[in-house]
Amino acid sequence: MRVDVPETRYAQSGDVSIAYKAVGDGPFDLVWTPGAFSNLELMWEEPAIARFYRGLASFGRLLLFDKRGTGLSDRVTGIADLETRMDDIRAVMDDAGSERAAIVGVSEGGPMAALFAATYPERAHALVSYGSLPRFVRGPGFPWGEPRHEYLAEWEEEARAWGTEQAARQMLEEQGIEQTPEKVAYYARRRRLSASPGAVLQLGRMNAEIDIRPILSTIRVPTLVLHRSEDHIPIEGARWMASQIPGATFVELPGGPHFPYYGDWESIVNAIREFVVPIVTTGEQPDRESVLATVLFTDLVGSTAKAAELGDRGWRDLLEQHHSRIRQQLVSFRGVELDTAGDGFFARFDGPARAIRCAAAIREAVGELGLDVRAGVHTGECEVLDGKVAGIAVSIGARVAARAGAGEVLVSQTVKDLVAGSGIGFEERGAAELKGVPGEWRLFAVESV
């Protein structure tokens, strides 16, 4: 190992250790959210990669990390959802003493970085997306990418040959990268030490579910979408993504390959520097009055009849227990209580999976009191006013909850799309019109958490 390789440190994200390196000591921070797999130590053995990272670190302190389950970070059961992995960015920034940074999302790391920038605009100077898409399979309204079955079949084939020199040669050939015995051996070893075949397969399945299109319009930080014209990731999809982010800049770079550190790597470093440095220098601030948030509404079913059965004193005592149990769950799942009206709660979360799991826990806790609760969850852009949130997303959340049945947790399509990889199961409830909200909304009942 070369003596100039930066030290590997560990940040705690919940009970998981995330490996990261801080490169350089520039005047601001740049967080590099990697693609599918990485290994912080082995990266520096490839001169082209080390050169690229040094280029980025020439104008800012570069924070590199291995996502949970990969590289030097803790191995975990399964592949975590975007929301959980988004927390890993925050953990790395906190441990490195970074209050605010430019967030760069590369390939599979793009949706994760975008979700972070939308949820925590106060911590993002800017967002840069390179070689990425809002979803990776073809779908309604998104004709780019491969059909789902072909995409999954490729990941299954990838997992079967994972870490072999044959697979490394094929990858280098597809990327148009010169093959030497040393480079083939390096990439085969790097893959083996970055992830297991099982993790590869799980990640592929999770990627097939990712769809962050609903949140693109909520990104309020300056955004640069970079894409090479010969990248195997469809450039048309990246161009469309840029058109959906308010004020985003799209830059097409000639040539390939997908890996940014090969080919004309300097054009990528220069594009990022030319975009980010003026923003940091001028101190441009994001719109702090709007943020991506998840809202949860709960309501007791049959409360009037129960109150009549118990009488005023008995009902008041039971309601106090109900409130206490809900507040305990809100604390456990990092929810923020915003309002309580009678026997209903309104809370805000920084991630939809946490809101769903909190709603399910509330259902169980309140059920032990002999009470039934209905709940609704929606994620969208909210206006922040005196610590509370308002706007159409809040109205949608309330209307979703109103359509839930006794003991049911109902969510919007947006929520379902954002919790890909969480293991949460849903049953479709069809399209519905929500009172006072335009259009039809596909709703889903939570079946398992």
Image (tube, rainbow, N blue to C red):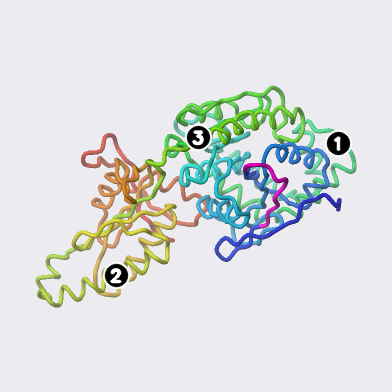
Determine the CA span between mark 2 and mark 3: 46 Å
Mark 3 or mark 1, which is nearer to you? 3
Report which quarter residue 355 is drawn in.
bottom left
Kindly identify the residue that appears in the image at 61 percent across and 33 percent down. Answer: 277
**Considering only order in the chain, which callout, 3 or 2, is on the residue closer to the N terminus?**
3
Secondary element at tag 2: helix
Residue 168 percent location from the top left of the image: 79, 43
Q: Position of residue 281 (x, y in %)?
A: 58, 34
Residue with the mark numbered 1: 179
| Range of residues picked out in magenta | 19-28
Residue 284, label in figure: 3
- For disc 2, the neighbor class at 10 Å (few under 14, some 14 to 19, many from 20) is many
Q: Specify the quadrant that holds the C terminus.
A: bottom left
Label 3 amino acid? Glu
Tags 2 and 3 touching, CB below 8 Å: no
The disc labelled 2 sits on which kind of residue?
Val
- Residue receiving disc 2: 366
Q: What is the C-alpha distance between the residues marked 2 and 1?
A: 62 Å
Magenta run includes residue 24: yes
**Is residue 337 within the magenta segment?**
no
Res 27 quadrant in image: top right
Q: CA distance from mark 3 to mark 1?
A: 44 Å
Left or right of 93, for residue 429: left
Rendering coords of residue 126 (x, y %):
54, 37
- Left or right side of 267 for 296: left
- Crowding at dot 1, Cα within 10 Å, few <14 / some 14-19 / many 20+, comes out as some
As rendered, which of 179 and 82 lies closer to the eye?
A: 82
Could you tell me residue 218's position as x and y percent? 42, 38
Q: Nearer the viewer, residue 268 or 207?
A: 268
Badge 2 or badge 1: first in the primary sequence = 1
Within-10-Å neighbours for mark 3: few <14, some 14–19, many 20+? few
